Amino acid sequence: MDRRQHRRAGGTAGMVGLAVGIAAGVGLGATGCSFSGAAAEDARGAGDPVTTLHRAAGTLRAAGSSRAATSMEMATGGTRVTIRGKGVYDYRRQLGRLTVRLPQDPAGNAEHRPITELLAPGALFMKNRGAGVPPDKWVRVDIATLSDGNLVTGGATDPYAAAELLRGTRTARYVGRSELGGVGVRHFRGTADLARAARSASAGNREALAAAAKGFATAEVPFDAYLDDEGRIRKIRQSFSFVNGRQRGTVAVASTTLLYGFGTPADVRLPPSKDIYAGRIAENQPSEERNSGR
């Protein structure tokens, strides 16, 4: 398979086919906060917001692992598409496993079996993508060839990539304290730059974020981040925008990641080469499925 096929894998048609919604439905909604005397005192103790957010990815790496719930949502052509995922992530090895559920049909019935996704530096592995792929085989996608760096295409933003995007934070402010699932968190709101994040990212995410900086409609990514008192990300919501070539318009995608259960074992093993599908994938599937690499 040549690189032109891989580039088509990251096309906007593929992103539209997979774009998505938020797993915040696990009951971790943020409560409201007021700027009382206690909140003002906390603001003084929050430190410089930009510096705090630059450190967030490193803090996750030190934490080792956690459970993760993801979601993306996109509205285009009067239709809202939502995809949810749940699984575990190992921040030191940058490996994750998610079970991703695609949207229901208009009658409310599930159209697809859940997809198992393995997240790894430079690659996305998917199982149960259909399209004539044998049920015991995996489809592999080379992330560096996706125009969005797999921040959107896979239907779930890689949790560590989402954290490393914060290394590109240009402006941020402290909003106040709130609570997620019984854990006190500090809420920050700001804007990150994908190109700047790529320059500071780990080797595993550098190419992906650089590709996203060029592939999205804008390299600026607005976000809301909720960090616990140890500096670990508990929730992050990021807004991406890309040009939909078919409709000649810009499409907004909101990606939300929830992290909890820190220290949960994350035994993620990538499939051997013999289990990776090398055949042609059906033409009626999104472009990234048709043209994924070996």
Image (cartoon, rainbow, N blue to C red):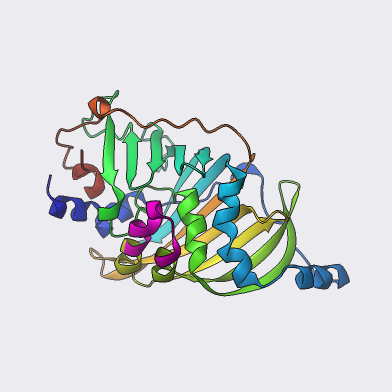
Q: In x, y percent, where is residue 133?
A: 23, 30
265 on left or right of 104:
right
252 on left or right of 260:
left
Residue at point 64%, 58% (across, down): 226
- Residue 35 in view of the camera: no
**Residue projecting furthest to the right:** 37
Q: In x, y percent, where is residue 172?
A: 60, 73
Q: Is residue 164 above or below residue 112?
A: below
In reply to whether residue 10 is colored magenta, the answer given is: no
Dividing the picture into quarters, in which one does residue 123 lie? top left
Q: Is residue 112 above or below residue 160?
A: above
Q: In x, y percent, where is residue 129?
A: 30, 35
- Residue 40 in view of the camera: yes
Q: In x, y percent, where is residue 79?
A: 39, 56
224 on left or right of 21:
right
The tally of labels here is 0
Q: Main secondary structure of the magenta part?
A: helix
Residue at point 33%, 48% (across, down): 122
Q: Is residue 38 above or below residue 91?
A: below
Residue at point 25%, 29% (across, down): 273
In reply to whether residue 208 is colored magenta, the answer given is: yes
In the rendered image, which quarter contains the N terminus?
top left
Residue at point 22%, 43% (across, down): 292
Choose between 249 and 190: the one closer to the eye: 190
Dividing the picture into quarters, in which one does residue 212 lie? bottom left
In the rendered image, which quarter contains the C terminus?
top left
Which stretch did the figure color magenta? Answer: 199-210
